[in-house]
Image (cartoon, rainbow, N blue to C red):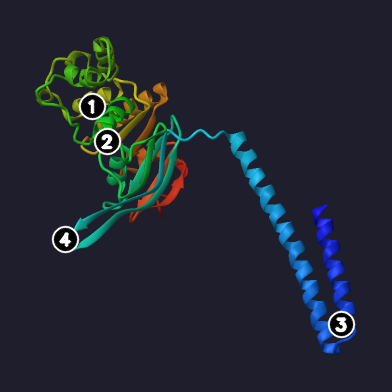
Amino acid sequence: MQVVWICLTGCGAVARGERIAKADDDGQVAIRALRLRLAAAMERSGQTERKKKQQNVSSRHIDIVARGSEPGMIEVRGLKKSIRNGSRTVEILKGIDLSVPQGQFLAIMGASGSGKSTLLGLLAGLDAPSEGQVLVDGTDISRLAEDKLAQVRGKKIGFVFQSYQLIPTLTAFENVLLPYELNANGDGKKHAAALLETVGLADRLHHYPVQLSGGEQQRVALARAFVLEPPIVLADEPTGNLDSSNGQHVLDLLTERQREANTTLVLVTHDRQIADRADRCIFLRDGRIVSDESGKQASYGD
């Protein structure tokens, strides 16, 4: 009805213009009539555009409802990180947007200095962004107080570092049990022992890190990362210090545990063979995501 009303008003205005124009110069007649027709046409066009926008908004709303509005296990929004170097500001991350759903294995690749480890540290809450947000299982950790942040890290995130980060004065068993004693209630000893058995270290429970090989230390670190069954595990070059055989073994164990527990795994690597095993791979260059593809189809920023 509104469209019809606009059309009628436009036509009436044109008619009135033509009657007025009879007493005017022929040139003014044409100009005035043209202006009135243009005004009516613009009004009709504007109404049509508004209706299209309303339809588009409605369609997007229906699509969102159909897909579900649940956020990813990790959500990154407009993430930036810069540091001061004397009088100069160095931009490390220049606006990262990323969503990682529950259970996905995401590999992060890029040249040295591209921002991979910085991004992983921000996802872990080990550093604060200069701008933007990091949401972990729905909680914005970007500006949390340190005590609250420690609680989120302790219960939601497991870590696997390139350099193992085992406590040298604790045995393999005690290193695995430590997150449980710090962040959970009850007795986690059976679970810790079972995890060490799973990674092939049932006969190394009471050995100290110095008594273990590099591959064995990383397997202890792997068991420690999963002892609380966190929804997220972050791994920074977990095979970087290992030979190919031990590296393959650790990666097999890591992906096996990830699949069994439906854990969201984010792994930084330089190794394309590792990235090929991921569900998805993003490639960073100069602080920005330049490609985001499935692991086996990734172009690695090429």
Give me the C-alpha separation between circle 4 and circle 3.
74 Å
Rendered residue at 82%/66% (across/down): 10
Q: Position of residue 200 (x, y in %)?
A: 25, 18
Above/below status of 210 relative to 282: above
Q: Nearer the viewer, residue 15 or 110?
A: 15
Label 4 close to label 3 by CB (< 8 Å): no
**Residue 21 image label:** 3
Q: Position of residue 129 (x, y in %)?
A: 30, 46
Comes first in the chain, label 3 or label 1: 3
Is disc 1 surrounded by few (<14), some (14 to 19) or many (20+) residues within 10 Å?
many
Q: Nearer the viewer, residue 229 or 299?
A: 229
Is disc 3 surrounded by few (<14), some (14 to 19) or many (20+) residues within 10 Å?
some
- Amino acid marked by disc 4: Gly
Task: Name the secondary structure under disc 3.
Answer: helix
- Amino acid marked by disc 3: Ala
Q: Is residue 2 visible?
A: yes
Comes first in the chain, label 4 or label 2: 4
**Residue 73 image label:** none
Q: Is residue 249 visible?
A: no
Give the image quarter of residue 296: top left
Which residue matches tag 1? 221
For the image shown, how many numbered marks are present on the structure?
4
- Amino acid marked by disc 2: Ala
Comes first in the chain, label 1 or label 2: 2
Which residue matches tag 4? 86
Give me the C-alpha separation between circle 2 and circle 3.
74 Å
286 sits to left or right of 209: right
Label 1 close to label 4 by CB (< 8 Å): no
170 sits to left or right of 121: left
- Amino acid marked by disc 1: Ala
Label 2 close to label 3 by CB (< 8 Å): no
